[in-house]
Image (cartoon, rainbow, N blue to C red):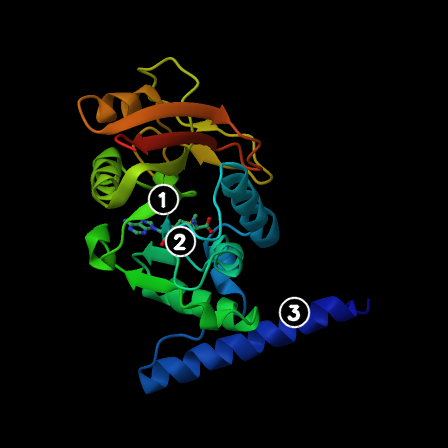
Amino acid sequence: MKRPAALTTIARKTKLRRRAIKAAHKLGLPAPMPPEWHRAAVGGMWEEIGQFQFDFLVSEGLAPEHYLLDVGCGSLRGGVHFVKYLEAGHYFGLDHNPRLLDAGRSELERAGIADKRPVLLADDNFRLVRFAQSFDFALAQSLFTHLPFNQIARCVAEIDRVLKPGGRFYATLFANPGPRLRTDTFPVRVDRPLDINLDKDPFYYDPDIFRWLCEGSDLSFDYRGDWGHPRYQHMMVFTKQGA
Ligand SMILES: C[S@@+](CC[C@H](N)C(=O)[O-])C[C@H]1O[C@@H](n2cnc3c(N)ncnc32)[C@H](O)[C@@H]1O
């Protein structure tokens, strides 16, 4: 039976990629990445989730003159929309993976908006004060779903230092529907099978733990819950007092 043309093309590309990886290995270079790897690496659904987070923040009052911090910005799935919309120099993105940030820079080139002076920083300990900027809005889209709680606590504490009075930090999570002391792994309803866990990535959390985290601080906490996210992540908002 004749092999369909599409399969032949895939086989040829796979062979070429294997050859390229071998050649790079011989030369002691990092393996070449497949095209668009950086879109898959942040979870895919590039257009849909990029546009979704942008539309949401605009509906929450994000205006072009605001300063926005995108924590765990990855390859700028949301970033390309924010950079286009905000005034030049008002978008700040942090990620611990410098290769994703480089891929994000290529996305900005591709979109013709690299001249809008976004500030991108690779940092693995949420040292947000390195930006030397305070923010009206901050976002962590699909970040806390990958982090153990003490890293989240550090991230929230560092964000508290750089939010303007009245500034708001929006973060998504997989919510534990209860009971609170459950330990099992269970599936979340998504377009692809995905199990979420108490103590390994991807994590679920009881939203009340974030309320507790803010007690006695200058952050107030609001659990928004379902906001129509295509992968069933929920939304919470931390607001800095004193506007
Ligand atoms: C699922 S991706 C989401 C990226 C982006 N927010 C988006 O919506 O496209 C999670 C991102 O968090 C980043 N990340 C994970 N742990 C991190 C950490 N400790 N510090 C900074 N970034 C981190 C990953 O490198 C990745 O880019």
The x, y position of residue 193, in whole percent, is 54, 37
The x, y position of residue 147, in whole percent, is 30, 40
Vertical arrangement, residue 220 with respect to residue 21, above or below: above
Residue occupying the point 40% across, 37% down: 170
Type of amino acid under label 2? Cys
| Residue named by callout 3 | 10
| Residue named by callout 1 | 136
Determine which quarter of the picture holds residue 3: bottom right
The residues bearing labels 3 and 1 have C-alpha atoms spaced at a distance of 46 Å
Residue occupying the point 27% across, 49% down: 134
The quarter of the image holding the C terminus is top left
Left or right of 94, for residue 110: right
The x, y position of residue 137, in whole percent, is 38, 43
Type of amino acid under label 1? Asp
Question: Would the CB of label 3 be found within 8 Å of ligand 1?
Answer: no
Upstream in sequence: badge 1 or badge 2: 2
Left or right of 215, for residue 14: right
The crowding category of the residue bearing disc 2, from other C-alpha atoms within 10 Å (few below 14, some 14 to 19, many at least 20), is many
Element type where label 2 sits in the image: loop
Front residue (pair 9, 117): 117
Are the residues tagged 3 and 1 within 8 Å (C-beta)?
no
Front residue (pair 99, 5): 99
Number of the front mark, 2 or 3: 2
| Residue named by callout 2 | 73
Number of the front mark, 3 or 1: 1
Left or right of 240, for residue 224: right
The x, y position of residue 173, in whole percent, is 41, 33
Question: Would the CB of label 2 be found within 8 Å of ligand 1?
Answer: yes
**Residue closest to the far bottom:** 27
